[in-house]
Image (cartoon, helix red, strand yellow):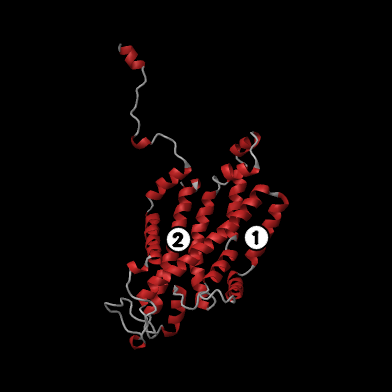
């Protein structure tokens, strides 16, 4: 009895929470993200900005278009915690409502750039050959064009359409058409890496066609770095919209934007710096939040950084 007991293997209790089970890349990434302070700080800032864009009435009951010249450059008060600008408009209300157009332009321009970059990068990486060479050279040409100059020229051309009264569509299309090159390069590299894996070769030997290989095997295993690039691109597009609006070729008319507010307040910065500082702070915090989120997701999905 004692000999049998000594020779028998000792059964160890299973680790709590299923730690002994293998996890997927997404599960490992989420495990790291939950412990990242940068991720949660960026996520909280982004949620606040999204709430401001969707329901600005939750943050202020003032009307950003309610301007009275007698309140020009008045200081902060209980009814206007950021004071008033040169037109007597509530700076806090304009800052809160300015998030809507900035987020709308940033999201939809990123979607347009994402679709273009996905199509170009996926086609170039999977098919290769002359198509890869042609698309890669086209990307190089696009990267050689100065972004700001091209955005000004294209933005003015699209804004000449009388239907674009506030310029939202023109700016969205401009940023989407010009901002897909980096995403396309990342997708191409990821597709080339995934295409050479053993599971793709096995699926091809079993008779899988190009469509099944792309959408069932290659794309799901190469989309993570692409999503990270789009997250960072979203913050860049928000800053680009503010830059174009500041230069006078972005949003206009009755649109309320951080870029417009910064542009209008520039000439009065010595008299009243508040109307310039507060939209700049909100813009910088929003862009920083999306970039921080992209960096945190990239670190979580990159096995080399573990």
- Give the residue number, with chain letter if any, for mark 1: 139
Relative horizontal placement of residue 66, taking residue 191 as reference (left or right):
left
Secondary structure at numbered mark 2: helix
In the picture shown, does residue 1 fall above or below 158?
above
Name the N-terminal-most of marks 1 and 2.
1
Number of marks drawn: 2
Residue placed under numbered mark 2 in the picture: 290
Picture layout, residue 261 above or below residue 294 = below
As rendered, which of 4 and 142 lies closer to the eye? 142
Residue 295 x, y percent position in the rendering: 46, 56
Q: Residue at x 49, y 68 (%)?
A: 239
Instruction: Name the foreground residue: 301 vs 85.
Output: 85
The quarter holding residue 212 reads: top right
Mark 2, residues whose alpha carbon is within 10 Å: few (<14), some, or many (≥20)? many
Horizontal arrangement in the rendering, residue 77 relative to residue 27 (left or right): left
Q: In the current view of this chain or complex, which residue is farthest to the bottom?
A: 70
Question: In the orientation shown, which residue stands out farthest toward the left?
Answer: 78
Question: What is the number of the mark on residue 17?
Answer: none
Q: Position of residue 249 (x, y in %)?
A: 55, 76
Q: Residue at x 47, y 79 (%)?
A: 263
Q: Report if the CB atoms under discs 1 and 2 are less than 8 Å apart.
A: no
Residue 178 spot, x, y in % from top left: 59, 65
């Amino acid at each position: 009895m004692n000999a049998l007991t000594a020779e028998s293997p000792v059964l160890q209790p299973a680790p709590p929470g299923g730690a002994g089970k293998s996890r997927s890349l997404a599960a490992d990434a989420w495990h790291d993200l939950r412990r990242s302070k940068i991720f949660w700080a960026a996520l909280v800032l982004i949620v606040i900005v999204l709430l401001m864009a969707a329901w600005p009435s939750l943050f202020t009951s003032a009307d950003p278009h309610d301007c009275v010249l007698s309140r020009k450059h008045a200081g902060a008060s209980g009814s206007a915690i950021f004071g008033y600008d040169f037109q007597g408009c509530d700076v806090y209300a304009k800052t809160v409502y300015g998030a809507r157009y900035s987020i709308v332009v940033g999201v939809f321009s990123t979607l347009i750039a994402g679709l273009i970059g996905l199509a170009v990068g996926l086609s170039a990486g999977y098919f290769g050959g002359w198509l890869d060479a042609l698309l890669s050279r086209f990307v190089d040409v696009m990267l050689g064009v100065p972004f700001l100059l091209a955005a000004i020229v294209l933005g003015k051309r699209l804004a000449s359409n009388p239907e674009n009264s506030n310029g939202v569509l023109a700016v969205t299309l401009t940023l989407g058409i010009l901002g897909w090159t980096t995403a396309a390069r990342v997708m191409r590299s990821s597709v080339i890496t995934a295409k050479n894996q053993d599971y793709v070769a096995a699926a091809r030997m079993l008779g899988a066609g190009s469509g099944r290989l792309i959408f069932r095997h290659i794309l799901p295993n190469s989309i993570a770095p692409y999503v990270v690039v789009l997250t960072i691109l979203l913050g860049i597009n928000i800053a680009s919209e503010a830059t174009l609006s500041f230069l006078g070729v972005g949003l206009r008319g009755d649109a309320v934007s951080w870029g417009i507010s910064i542009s209008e307040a520039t000439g009065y910065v010595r008299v009243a710096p508040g109307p310039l500082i507060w939209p700049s702070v909100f813009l910088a915090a929003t862009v920083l939040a999306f970039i921080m989120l992209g960096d945190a997701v990239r670190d979580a999905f990159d096995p080399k950084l573990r």
